[in-house]
Amino acid sequence: MKFIIVALAIILMAQTSFASSPQYVQLNATTIRSSQLIQNLRDLGADYVIQQGVFVSTKAPLPGSFYKLTKTEKVEQKVTPSITYYRFTVILYEQDKLAIVRATYVVSFKPSNGAFLVTSFKYNIIGGNPNGEQSVGGPSLIDVRPLNNGTDDLSPLLADAIKSVVADAKKNGELPKSKYTLRYVYNAYLVNSGYPPQYVFLVKLVNSKGQTYRVEITATENVGGEDNQNPAYVIYPNA
């Protein structure tokens, strides 16, 4: 009898704990449209999934050279005392119609310092023509793995661009005065095949105070030995 009472108590405690733990809640379209943070994290997560699918996956590689997020099917939010989790379900479209992909991924976000991380993802190819021809001259993805270990031919260009962007952003009050370190490159692509070549990088910068920022940088490759002095950039808000 005592065993049964103890067992029931354990079950009741487990049910109470589950009921009180944070659960995902689906957000409406108005909330999504009004939050730049949610949209930015959605796009960043999609970029991460695309990089993994095109360059890393061997079981389900994504065909083609460039993808766009064309539809947001669902956004869910789970709020804990220190971290907010966003679960996105989106449709990704390859520019040459080689694949249509449904992807679901979770991005964590820490409001206190802006830290973020793609914690999980999955995707399925739901359409497209994998035997179609690829176009020439449009945007083309770049594998970020060599950029993340500093061995890519574009690593010096990115390092110079980050140095310039940080200096300019601190001067303009867009970034607090601190020392900044490149923590991760989430996406990179060649804008077009024109001359001089131009590239876009989506990076995570962390400063000496532990504050994290998402920065998109557009940089032009050095021409005639001259440095690219004025890369364009966008620093995405943490609220």
Image (cartoon, rainbow, N blue to C red):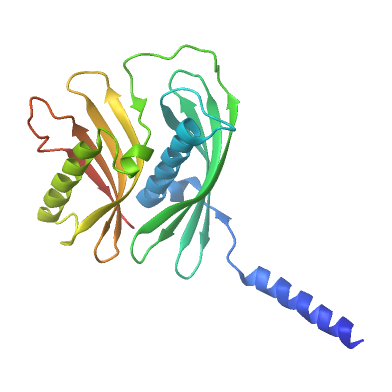
Residue at 29%, 62% (x, y): give it.
211
- The image position of residue 62, as x and y in percent, is 51, 28
Horizontal placement of 25 versus 180: left or right? Answer: right
- The image position of residue 235, as x and y in percent, is 25, 48
Q: Residue furthest top?
A: 133
Residue at 25%, 38% (x, y): give it.
155
Tell me: residue 90, above or below residue 110. above
Residue 4 image-quadrant placement: bottom right
Q: Residue furthest bottom?
A: 2
Horizontal placement of 232 versus 90: left or right? Answer: left
Tell me: residue 141, above or below residue 177. above
Residue 103 image-quadrant placement: top right
Q: Residue furthest right?
A: 1
Could you tell me which quadrant the N terminus lies in? bottom right
Residue at 41%, 38% (x, y): give it.
47
Tell me: residue 82, above or below residue 168. below
